[in-house]
Image (spheres, rainbow, N blue to C red):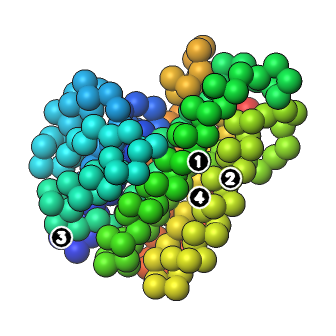
Amino acid sequence: MNNKKTTKIVLITGASSGIGAATAKKLVNNGHKVILCARSIDKLQALTSELGEDNAFAVTTDASQLEQMRNAVEDAVKRFGRLDAVFANAGTGVNTPGVESGVPEEWDKMIEVNINALLYTAKASLSELKKTTGQFIITSSIAGKRTLKGSIYGATKWFAYGFGLNLGEEMAQWGGRCTTICPGMVNTPFFDEAKPDKLDPEDIADAVLFALSANPRCDIREVCLMPTY
């Protein structure tokens, strides 16, 4: 899948580690090119070096800032000539769960990343995706499909899930596609302790590649993954 007809140009937010980095590697290994967006310049540069500068382009970006996302999309198009897909993957949680015991400052930060960054990534990229009849992919969570006691994090993922479904309807008007991925617990740096018995970031990367590889007649609106044990 390394010819011009099948190679896709994919922008990834939250690309410096975990699901984002695993997806970047998976896509490049399958003949695609990626724009890596995150705040950690050192990690982005290391990943770009690993993937090769012909295949990966790093843009230091805070996805919760609309102008920075607009600049990232502009830089991506300047570098590769077009934008075929976006993987809106940036996300975070809180240290203190619950509502009564929760910390509003943690909520504010999480809302900026889990909600605002998602909205701004879509706002900044849709005009370019429209030119290529492109695809928008979202990392939500199984927490966005279930009720979890006092979970503000889960509520932000409910937003991501609903937004993805609604965005899919909007994009369908011009032939675009939107896929919302809802994984269960994933073994990423998101957790203080490793979760080796849960999903691996590569599992979500596989789901992204699956959605991107679907025939244009097939609009995969949702992918749900759960650990088998």
User: Given contact means CB atoms under 8 Å apart, are the residues at marks 3 and 4 in contact?
Assistant: no
Quadrant position of residue 126 = bottom left
Number of the front mark, 3 or 2: 2
Cα–Cα gap, marks 2 and 1: 7 Å
Determine whether, in the image, residue 90 is placed left or right of residue 80.
right
Where does the N terminus fall, quadrant-wise?
bottom left
In the image, 53 versus 103, the foreground residue is 103
User: Given contact means CB atoms under 8 Å apart, are the residues at marks 2 and 1 in contact?
Assistant: yes
Which residue in the rendered view is the most extreme toward the top? Answer: 193
Cα–Cα gap, marks 3 and 1: 34 Å
Judging by the rendered image, the residue that carries numbered circle 1 is 115
What is the x, y in percent for residue 55?
A: 18, 49
Mark closer to the chain start, 4 or 2: 2
**Disc 2 residue type (three-letter):** Phe
Q: Secondary structure at mark 2?
A: helix
Q: What residue is rendered at 46% in x and 77% in y?
A: 176
Image disc number at residue 159: 2
What is the x, y in percent for residue 56?
A: 21, 46
Q: Secondary structure at mark 1?
A: helix
Mark closer to the chain start, 3 or 4: 3
What is the x, y in percent for residue 140?
A: 62, 48
Q: What residue is rendered at 44% in x and 62% in y?
A: 123
Cα–Cα gap, marks 4 and 2: 11 Å
Judging by the rendered image, the residue that carries numbered circle 4 is 180
**Disc 4 residue type (three-letter):** Thr
Q: How many marks?
A: 4
Judging by the rendered image, the residue that carries numbered circle 3 is 4
In the image, 81 versus 6, the foreground residue is 81
Crowd around label 3: few <14 · some 14–19 · many ≥20 (10 Å): few
What is the x, y in percent for residue 179?
A: 55, 63
